[in-house]
Amino acid sequence: MYKIGQVVQGMITAIKPYGAFVKVDERTSGLIHISEISEYYINDVAYFFKKGEKVIVKIIDINKYGQLRLSLKAIQTNRKYAVPTKKDIAKIEKIGFKSLKEKLPVWIEDALKEKV
């Protein structure tokens, strides 16, 4: 019936910390594992999906019971709510802490002047 590589539409039926369950038809369901949602780091699956939401996904595997392993990232590399990777965050933090280091002495001086 379904084949690996096929793109299908389904509805989110449940959201768990490890992924989202999708009903494709009356007899077929599958899981979008957290690792298959986005190429970016995912902290909360519920940030990406709502129960009852329709999604278009790609079938990346089918187990012996006919359950589908689904992927969103295989067809959508730039999801609207994607979270930056840890590497991206490290770059941002480096810039942010440098700014704080430079400004902190000025802020301390200003705060001490206000107390007098």
Image (cartoon, rainbow, N blue to C red):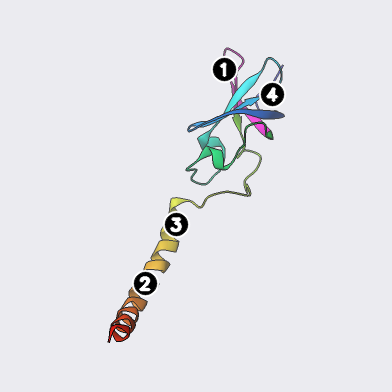
Q: Amino acid at mark 3?
A: Ile
Q: Amino acid at mark 4?
A: Val
Residue 89 disc label:
3
Whole-Å distance between the Cαs marked 3 and 1? 36 Å
- Circle 2 or circle 3, nearest the eye: 2
Q: Earlier in the sequence, mark 3 or mark 1?
A: 1
Circles 3 and 4: CB distance less than 8 Å? no
The residue tagged with tag 1: helix, strand or loop? Answer: loop
Q: Nearer the viewer, residue 19 or 6?
A: 19
Residue 63 disc label:
1
Residue 45 in the magenta stretch? The answer is no
Which residue lies at the image location 62% right of the left edge and 46% below the top edge? 77
- Circle 2 or circle 4, nearest the eye: 2
Q: Residue furthest top?
A: 65
Residue 58 in the magenta stretch? The answer is yes
Residue 89 in the image, given as x and y percentages of width and height: 44, 57
Q: Earlier in the sequence, mark 2 or mark 1?
A: 1
Which residue lies at the image location 48% right of the left edge and 45% below the top edge? 41
Which residue lies at the image location 56% right of the left edge and 42% below the top edge? 47
Q: Residues within 10 Å of mark 1 (few under 14, many from 20)?
A: few
Range drawn in magenta? 55-69
- Where is 97 relative to 77, above or below? below
Q: Earlier in the sequence, mark 2 or mark 3?
A: 3
Q: Earlier in the sequence, mark 2 or mark 4?
A: 4
Residue 38 in the image, given as x and y percentages of width and height: 56, 42
Residue 100 disc label:
2
* Residue highlighted by disc 4: 24
- Where is 26 relative to 116, above or below? above
- Circle 2 or circle 1, nearest the eye: 2
Q: Amino acid at mark 2?
A: Leu
* Residue 92 in view in this figure: yes
Q: Residues within 10 Å of mark 4 (few under 14, many from 20)?
A: many
